[in-house]
Image: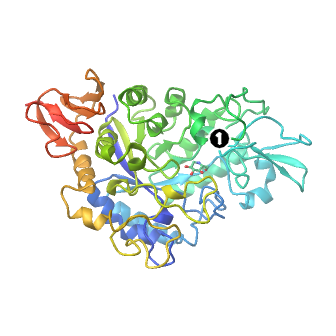
Amino acid sequence: MPGRGEVVYQVYPRSFADSDGDGVGDLEGIRQRLDHLRWLGVDALWLSPVYPSPLADWGYDVSDYTDIDPRLGSLEAFDRLLADAHDRDLRLLMDLVPCHTSIEHAWFREHPDWYIWADSGEGPPNNWTSAFGGPAWEHDSSTGRWYLHSFYPEQPDLDWHKPVVVDAMQNVVRFWIERGVDGFRLDAIDRLVKDRELRDDPPSEEPFGLPLMEHELGRDLRNSRNAPGTGRALAALREAAGDDALLVGEVYLPTVRAAPYLEHLDRLFVFELLHATWDADVLRRAIRPAAALRGRPGAAPAWVLSNHDFGRLAHRFGREHERAAAMLLLTLPGSAFIYQGDEIGMGNGPGAKPPRDRIGRDSFRHPMQWDGTAGGGFTTGTPWLPLDDAAVRNVADQRGDPGSLLSFYRDLIALRRTLPAGFEAVDDIPGVVSYRSGDRLVVINLSGERRSIPGGEVLLATATGAVSRDGSLARHAGAVIAPT
Ligand code: NOJ
């Protein structure tokens, strides 16, 4: 039975804190704000990519895996950040993007054979689709051949069937491990290995060309992802990272099918929960199989309710549910990932005109709101994405208020440390998601009505008075209860 693993805080570096007034967040800004993470009580931070990048996919198109984008800092700034994080007992996870590089990476020019090419004349060689919509193949006019891109055309896929590619990425992993990082979040890792023979995926009901990322969970893309050889590729990443590194997989498959990844990785994001609606049955269906995951020693699910791709927790579930959702996130067995700003209830932002992200993710990425000043304490310059409502929601105001959402997150994280290991779904109250960890009971009321719950001492509730004297739980509320 997995215990409660680490709480990881996702930092989206361009939008966290800008130390030099150019409107873009940077590593020095993150370093200066580490005390926020310490105060909150998280165990680790995950940095979305900080490598040099032409920004076709805002850093997920890497043009050099062993350097820092000069707009974000330098290797020296990175070392300072890492040292200060470690001084505060915070582990640091890099984002590793091993499936594809930027088209501007020197490898693409110098070693085109490291990538996946096909000669198919007029049309693409098969029916594979990009996760961002449209065919996954781009015609290269200089060679007359087609290259594969599982995401944007500016992100050609590496060929993991080639030992030289495996070696090159192992060297990248070693570079960062030797620098002292504690692990990696592995981007799009289900797309790492494809069918060698480039056979078609089964035909899909989905119209070819939909922006598919959100639809991929249920699709049978048996040849364009998760193909035989995946285990060997994961083992190579583990070998380079070493046994102590924390490896977190972004595996965009139903959790039960992704389970084998935990033979090599430590955590798997549970995407069913990320895409769940606020409905008791939907949540139960997402939680049960994931809570039962097994794998290498210590392997566990990584729960996540929002990130830079799919929008904000407050927006998806509605403000009235944001505390109960946080309670769910932080009491389930395994690891919990908090996306920066969710702890103060940031919603989806205003986006940008013209848009910066081509598939519309700007409004999930707007700058962190540290205080109520014009730049939100994020920047003294012009922010690269517009701020949202810093005057209404910011860290400074909420930190001084014991009843704030921010204080609630802190209380939850502190309580989490005291929860016994174990998970037993109870779920016998209609519309109430509930589970036991040892003698503690978590109850989350999604029924829309007040519900009777077992009695006991309320250790933490989503609001004062959420559990009434007669032992019932208010609608939209949650509580953690100990026997009296
Ligand atoms: C998943 C990342 O989270 C997303 O932001 C990115 O666009 C794709 N992988 C491609 O790297």
Q: Residue furthest front?
A: 449
Image quarter in which the N terminus is found? top left
Q: Is mark 1 within 8 Å of ligand 1?
A: no
* Left-right relation of 464 to 65: left
> Taking 321 as reference, is 481 above or below it?
above
Residue 332 versus residue 282: which sits nearer the camera? 282
Image quarter in which the C terminus is found? top left
Q: Position of residue 406 (x, y in %)?
A: 27, 56
Q: Position of residue 27 (x, y in %)?
A: 47, 68
The answer to whether residue 417 shows anywhere in this view is no
Q: Position of residue 167 (x, y in %)?
A: 67, 48
Res 471 quadrant in image: top left
Q: Residue beneath label 1, please?
A: 192
> Taking 409 as reference, is 327 above or below it?
above
Tag 1: amino acid:
Leu
Residue 210 versus residue 483: which sits nearer the camera? 210
The residue sitting at 59% across, 36% down in the picture is 215
> Could you tell me how many numbered marks the image carries?
1
